[in-house]
Amino acid sequence: MDIDRKDGRTANQLRPLSCTRNVLNRAHGSASWSQGETKVLAAVYGPKAGTNKNENPEKACFEVIWKPKTGQIGKAEKEYEMILKKTVQSICVLNVHPNTTTSIIIQVVNDDGALLPCAINALCAALVDAGIPLKHLAVAICCCLTESGHILLDPSKLEEQRMKAFVYLVFPNSTLSVLPEEALKVRGEPMEHGLITSSTHGVMSVDDYIRCLERGRAATSKLSDFFRRNLQSQVQSD
Amino acid sequence: MGSKPCFIDKLVVPGDVVLDLSSMTNQTIKLGGGLQQDHDTVTVVKAGILRFSKPNKYWIESSHKRYIPTVGDAVLGIVVDKRADSFYVDIKGPMMAFLPVLAFEGGTRRNIPKFEVGTLIYTRIVKANPGINPELSCMDASGKAAEFGPLKDGYMFESSTGLSRMLLSTPTCPVLEGLGKKLAFEIAVGLNGRVWVNAEHKSSIILAANAIMNSESLTPVQQKIMVERLLDRVN
């Protein structure tokens, strides 16, 4: 079952994570998130008064701007912006600040695979830093499927190019609760098994997709633990 | 039921369920910022430390650069525009706040205060509803001017809301206590993350402002040491 990866990782192993919040002086909330060599900087400005055209003024509105490392934004980046916007809208409590707009700017510092999940994680950390009301946090992971049918987590750029297919998955974080665990389950499954966003590239069978989901879920529990520990350390140093 | 997790004075993140209302039916509780009721449970919407104050108040303590207006908060605002019936004041919130021209002690149509654009005023929030502009007043609840009004001279700097709250906490925080022993200065702290300092000598203003700005990330003991060192250097 073991397959070789360039950097000597096992199939389920993530690259080293690091997250720093409040990195920008003038933004209301900011965070930089890196997974190995992939690094993304997210900044949140707002909430500001008024909503854009074609938005519902009874809800909070979000705009996402994607800044690539070099050059102009193309179709792929526009798609990323859309995915990020939909994800943010589903994790935020939209009726606390109606008729306001929050701008989110995503700056890619370095792309070495799994860029979108990294951006979603950075974005979530920046939203927490800005104090935007959230229903829960989101943790994102990239799973990819090799030609031989193995599943690798958190691929690097080189691995991503060689893959048959890959999927970006976003899950809610695991939460703590005073309630007994049974009470939190939604239709018999824990809350963190719900899926917020899923975006696939390439062809994969349903069975492979289900396997990816299982692996992704297992890995995101580690990610959400990392997130909580990171927030904790920041609070204690204050 | 004996081993229920308790989150008070611990870090909580959005999504955590901190209270189960079905097991506390005969109590009235008050929820502050960062908490939201969802049917029979209370969930967290902002990351921070869960605080509890006897008998029944719960809130999340966190520090941000942006301020969300709340009724009763004393804030420092900057006049941005003047209309016939109210001033437009920036309080670092999502929307401009209105300060009616009659919301001053003894305010009548005949004596309207003359504030230039850019004037810094110490004021109180009297209305804050989501979706509409908050309303300010320069009077306390009994209609007296109290300490509210324009702040002349001095130096205003921006801080996080956490630092403002620390400066206003009781007992007096070590920075202010340390500075107060050696220096004579005036200070006005707005909960919206603005601090105004004034003193007779310019050097005292700079010293006090720098000490306060530096104290944000320090523990009480470190604050005390930092202030003592600063004061030793100038005297």
Image (cartoon, rainbow, N blue to C red):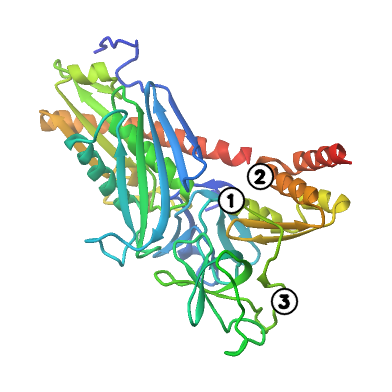
Name which quarter of the figure residue A141 lies in: top left
Residue B20's place in the image compared with A216, above or below, is: below
Residue A60 image offset from top left, x and y in percent = 34, 60
Q: Amino acid at mark 2?
A: Glu
Where does residue B44 sit, x and y in percent of width and height? 46, 54
The residue labelled by disc 3 is B146
- Relative horizontal placement of residue A195, taking residue B106 as reference (left or right): left
- Residue contact between numbered discs 1 and 2, judged by CB atoms under 8 Å: yes
Residue tagged 1: B160
Which comes before the other along the chain, label 1 or label 2? Answer: 1
The residue marked by circle 2 belongs to what chain? B
Residue to which mark 2 is pinned? B216
* Helix, strand or loop at mark 2: helix
- Chain designation of label 3: B
Residue B62 lies, in percent from the top left, at 56, 51
Amino acid at the residue labelled 1: Ser
**Percent x, y for residue B221?**
78, 41
Q: Residues within 10 Å of mark 1 (few under 14, many from 20)?
A: many
Q: What residue lies at 30% left-to-right and 39% top-to-bottom?
A: A66
> How crowded is the residue under tag 2: few (<14 C-alpha within 10 Å), some, or many (20+)?
some
Examine the image and state in which quarter residue A148 appears.
top left
The amino acid type found where label 3 is placed reads Ala
- At numbered mark 1, what does the secondary structure look like: helix, strand or loop? loop
Instruction: Work out whether residue A155 can be spotted.
Output: yes
Q: Earlier in the sequence, mark 1 or mark 3?
A: 3
Q: Is residue A217 visible?
A: no
Tell us which disc is closer to us: 2 or 3.
3
Query: Residue A81 bears which disc, if any?
Result: none
Disc on the earlier residue, 2 or 3? 3
- Locate the C terminus of chain A by quadrant: top right
Please give the name of the residue rendered at 40% of the width and 52% of the height, measured from the top-left corner: A134
